[in-house]
Amino acid sequence: MDLVALEIFRTVAHEGSVTRAAERLGRAQSNVTTRVQQLEEQLGTALFLREGRRMVLTPAGATLQGYAERLLALAEEARQALHPGTPAGHLRIGAMESTAAARLPAPLAQLHARWPALVLELRTAPSRQLVEQVLAHELDCALVAWPPPGLDEEAPVQRTPVWTESLLLALPASHPPAETPADLRVHTLAAFAHGCTYRRIGEDWMRQATGQAPQVLELASYPAILACVAGGRCAGVVPEAVVDLLHTPPALRWVPLGPCDTVLVHRTGYATPALAALQAALHGAQDTPSVLAPDSSLRS
């Protein structure tokens, strides 16, 4: 069981397809299939169920996946430790949808330009899931809204403050002016899936109006959330940086909810030149104004 075989196995597990895994790895499909079969023979158990063209992990495969993530992450960390002055290799970064869209393009572009040998991989998910992926060695670090809901306070992660986001509650244009939860006339929240810190903040704020948690309409993007709000039946929590970025309906009402910290988290003890280079790029971006100036017409 070598690292190449584990990398192929991990990629097939992530992609759920030999075809997509082969494309991502730059290998022939037959080579990927053969290496997976050889690994299964070596371990004496099936790692995947073949459902047509889909590859689904068996219980044994799911167990191996956790070990493979840790072994490959440790191998990458070791490779980088041998060349401490030059960020290179892979850096798997997680981020919230809002951070990926509004905050990361400039620092990641600068990082790539300065260290072209460093391969960056960016994945988006709600904050709690991102921290869980860091702890499972599926990500090297992540930018999350702190604290994520439902996260174990003793989770072995180190965190560094990066930005403070100003959160806004979006309300339909027809909604009367609202300054407190008691002023709300809608009781449904359009939001991301469980694990989203902003969703938890919106739920807590709206709960003050009735003493009950609001109904939640789960959506996968901010444009979808704002479109539902514009439809008149729900509210949504949006970082101000995203409002400035998107072409939002100008007639929406906006209620300030206060600040929320975005932090960079990584496993305790994890330190590589690539992580240090990312931290430097993020620090340099903290004082860089957005290329999109806020439009005062969006505030009503």
Image (cartoon, rainbow, N blue to C red):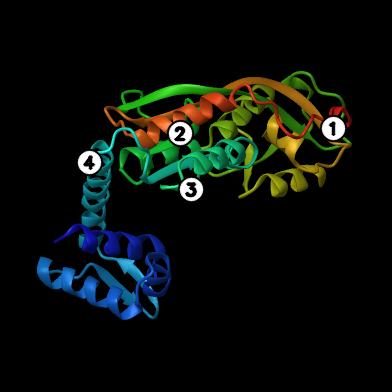
Q: Kindly identify which residue carries mark 4.
A: 78
Q: Kindly identify which residue carries mark 2.
A: 278
| Camera-side residue of 18 and 284 | 284
Report x, y in % for residue 66. Answer: 25, 50
Q: Mark 4 or mark 1: which comes first in sequence? A: 4
Report x, y in % for residue 156. Answer: 29, 27
Q: Using the image, tell me which numbered label, if any, was put on residue 123.
A: 3
| Above or below, comparing residue 293 to residue 192 in the picture | above
Q: Kindly identify which residue carries mark 1.
A: 298
Q: Mark 4 or mark 2: which comes first in sequence? A: 4
For the residues marked 4 and 1, what is the alpha-carbon distance in whole angstroms? 49 Å
Q: Mark 3 or mark 1, which is nearer to you?
A: 3
Q: Mark 1 or mark 2: which comes first in sequence? A: 2
Q: Mark 4 or mark 1, which is nearer to you?
A: 4
* Badge 3 vs badge 4, beta-carbon distance below 8 Å: no
For the residues marked 3 and 1, what is the alpha-carbon distance in whole angstroms? 29 Å
Report x, y in % for residue 300. Answer: 87, 27
Q: Is residue 179 left or right of residue 89?
A: right
Query: In terms of secondary structure, where does tag 1 sit?
Result: helix
- Point out the image quarter for the N terminus: bottom left
Q: Residues within 10 Å of mark 4 (few under 14, many from 20)?
A: few
Q: Mark 3 or mark 1: which comes first in sequence? A: 3
